[in-house]
Amino acid sequence: MGAYLDRIDAALPEARWPLVRTLMHKEGAPFFAELRAERPVLALPELTFLTRHVDVAQVYHRFREFGVDLYKPKQGSYFMAQDDTADHWREKGVMRAILDYEALPEMRDFVAATAAAILDDAGGTIDLPKAYTRAVPVALVQRFFGFHESDPALLTDWSYWNQQDAFHNQPFDADRTPDGAHISDKRKASIAALAGHIVEIVKRRGAELKAGKGGDDSISRLLRLSFSGGIQFPVERVVSNAGGLLIGSVETTSHVVNHALAELFARPEVLKAAIAAAADPDPSGFDGYVWEALRLNPAFPYSFRVAHVATSFADDTQHRRRVEPGTTLLLCTRSAMLDPAAVADPETFDPSRDPGQTFTFGYGEHECLGRAIATAMVPEMVRQLLPRPGLRVEGPIGYEHNVPERHVFHWRTLPDIVAAAN
């Protein structure tokens, strides 16, 4: 038995999940390699862990048998908290249709200009989560999704508490979130405030549309569809789905941008090549550095599902294990993306790797709705920072409530360069 499994087995039952969580985050690659080889299905009292690519993909694919039950208390009737329902398929189709993918080049140009302006004004020092990695996606939400008049601080706050409660305040997180009730209360208050805010936006946009005016943002598009009566999409669903656009855009973007940068700075030779690629006006040779960094250092190293049927995993190995209905499964996507049975040379940093082979955006029925927009926004935010002269990171990411809250970078400004030359 490997050293990690020996430690887990020797721990008291109530101490095993906290220990596994620490090992996942602190020693992920070697820890997961041992699990894939010796216990690919790790059963603890609270959770059962799946570590192989084939088993993770199977759960994602079989969405009727492994559901998103744990999201329902947090997200209510929102379509992403449903499995294989009419509302899910209809509203996902609507949201994909109104997100103007033809505008992706314009969105990327907007992100580039917004990011550059923030960095230019930073004076050579910036704390990314506080001044950059949330600010840029908030600006995009305002510009393209219909939140033109909204307060950026409030948009950030509303996204934050909803993400905290959905992803970091689940029943199996009780040992690390003693303030779980407070987080849930903040999410409920945020939802109420956000809904009220969107209702006011909808009233204004609706009046503009009925007067023959109106814009081309996402909320206006949703209202046009709702007013048409062509499908079952009442105004209250406009409000719900507009809120989902905000909630899904800000905090997740901040998290992944910080993780991508941390991984690049942990690899000096890769970083050097990425900086050179970032300087090319054509970004096509650069983006792969970001997606490969996120394969190796994902912001979310797992997702979770609840088994609805009895199923066995690792059937093709001597470690086959049966899972009973009601079991909470932790899909260890970080491990899956390092699985040599599915990923060629998984330990090698390969910026030419197809990101579609990863679980960075999830997989299957619940794949990230904004995947296409993220493919424009996330790498461009990294790309705008890397070419800054003398760029250095002050230290590792500082986390609070399990998300990046401090990640300070310094670089030389033009006055610094002139002064040094003289």
Image: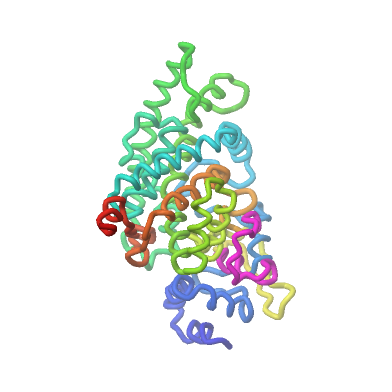
Residue lying farthest to the right in this orientation:
316
The region drawn magenta spans 329-357
Residue 317 sits above or below residue 393 on the image? below
Q: Quadrant of residue 197?
A: top left
Residue 42, percent from left and from top: 57, 74
Q: Main secondary structure of the magenta part?
A: loop
Q: Nearer the viewer, residue 297 or 264?
A: 264
Residue 65, percent from left and from top: 66, 56
Residue 81 seen in this snapshot:
no
Taking the spot 36% from the left edge, 40% from the top edge, the residue there is 155
Q: Nearer the viewer, residue 65 or 150?
A: 150
- Relative horizontal placement of residue 417, taking residue 370 as reference (left or right): left
Q: Nearer the viewer, residue 340 or 21?
A: 340
Q: Total of numbered circles in the picture?
A: 0
- Relative horizontal placement of residue 392, taking residue 9 as reference (left or right): left
Taking the spot 38% from the left edge, 58% from the top edge, the residue there is 403
Q: Quadrant of residue 239?
A: top left
Q: Quadrant of residue 393?
A: bottom left
Taking the spot 53% from the left edge, 59% from the top edge, the residue there is 303
Residue 158, percent from left and from top: 36, 43
- Relative horizontal placement of residue 392, taking residue 54 as reference (left or right): left
Residue 408 sits above or below residue 208 on the image? below
Residue lying farthest to the front in this orientation:
422
Quadrant where the N terminus sits is bottom right
Residue 361 sits above or below residue 139 on the image? below
Q: Is residue 345 magenta?
A: yes
Quadrant where the C terminus sits is bottom left
Taking the spot 48% from the left edge, 85% from the top edge, the residue there is 7
Residue 195, percent from left and from top: 39, 34
